[in-house]
Image: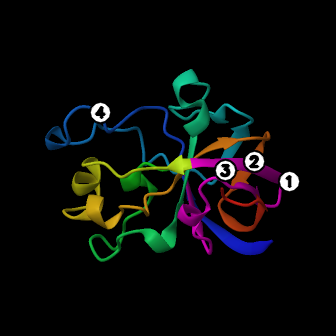
């Protein structure tokens, strides 16, 4: 196990990046970042736009490493711009595609299957800034399936690779 930090959590009830990037993102209610997120096995984050959506069962939660954010393009970049769900400091989740991991924020461990890369799209050039899509290539986070019910909290956490990437 390693010590990590959950820097931000985002639970968004609505898709904000729909249509053409040139039209800009749809307005949202508040900034959608939360201090606490409830996780349901194989369903996702309670209240999120991908929760219990059959088409997103293998990708209902997206984790990203803060170290991979293009802060040279926008120093304030975070989950509001990238639209990922969990921002971690201290582990390169992009290198763990195919692994099963355990994240414990102090309320019990939650396992996640890290299924596939979250490929950055053209929206990144709009929400983060010009060049962000290219800067996030192979560093855009990982689409995951939660394997346990639990709670994620912003703050210190413990991270463990349960089974290695394939």
The residue that label 2 is drawn on is: 151
Q: How many marks?
A: 4
The residue that label 4 is drawn on is: 18
Secondary structure, mark 4, is loop
Q: In the rendered structure, which disc, 3 or 4, sits on the residue that comes first in sequence?
A: 4
Residue 125, relative to residue 58: is it above or below? below
Q: CA distance from mark 3 to mark 4?
A: 26 Å
Mark 4 and mark 1 residues within 8 Å of each other at the beta carbon: no
**Nearest the eye: 114 or 12:** 114
Q: CA distance from mark 3 to mark 2?
A: 7 Å
Mark 2 and mark 1 residues within 8 Å of each other at the beta carbon: yes
The residue that label 3 is drawn on is: 36
The residue that label 1 is drawn on is: 108
Q: In front: mark 3 or mark 4?
A: 4
Q: In the rendered structure, which disc, 3 or 2, sits on the residue that comes first in sequence?
A: 3
Q: Split into 4 quadrants, where in the image is the C terminus?
A: bottom right
Q: In the rendered structure, which disc, 4 or 1, sits on the residue that comes first in sequence?
A: 4
Q: Residue at x 83, y 54 (%)?
A: 107
Q: In front: mark 3 or mark 2?
A: 2
- How far from the left and from the top, in percent, is residue 69? 41, 68
Assess whether residue 138 is covered by the magenta stretch: no
Q: CA distance from mark 2 to mark 4?
A: 29 Å
Q: CA distance from mark 4 to mark 1?
A: 35 Å
- How far from the left and from the top, in percent, is residue 130? 18, 62
Q: Residue at x 54, y 31 (%)?
A: 56
Q: Residue at x 23, y 62 (%)?
A: 129
Secondary structure, mark 2, is strand
Region in magenta: 86-115
Bin the neighbour count of mark 4 within 10 Å (Cα to Cα): few under 14, some 14-19, many 20 and up. few
């Amino acid at each position: 196990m390693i010590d990590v930090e959950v820097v931000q959590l985002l639970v968004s009830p609505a898709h904000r990046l729909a249509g053409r990037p040139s039209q800009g993102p749809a307005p949202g209610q508040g900034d959608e970042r939360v201090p606490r997120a409830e996780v349901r096995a194989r369903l996702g984050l309670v209240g999120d736009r991908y929760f219990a959506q059959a088409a997103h069962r293998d990708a209902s939660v997206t984790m990203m490493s803060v170290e991979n954010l293009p802060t040279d393009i926008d120093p304030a970049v975070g989950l509001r711009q990238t639209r990922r769900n969990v921002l971690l400091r201290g582990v390169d989740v992009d290198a763990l595609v195919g692994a099963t991991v355990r994240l414990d924020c102090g309320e019990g461990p939650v396992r996640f299957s890290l299924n596939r890369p979250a490929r950055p799209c053209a929206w990144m050039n709009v929400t983060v800034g010009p060049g962000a899509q290219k800067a996030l290539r192979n560093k855009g986070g990982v689409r995951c399936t939660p394997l346990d019910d639990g709670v994620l909290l912003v703050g210190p956490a413990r991270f463990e690779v349960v089974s290695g990437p394939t």
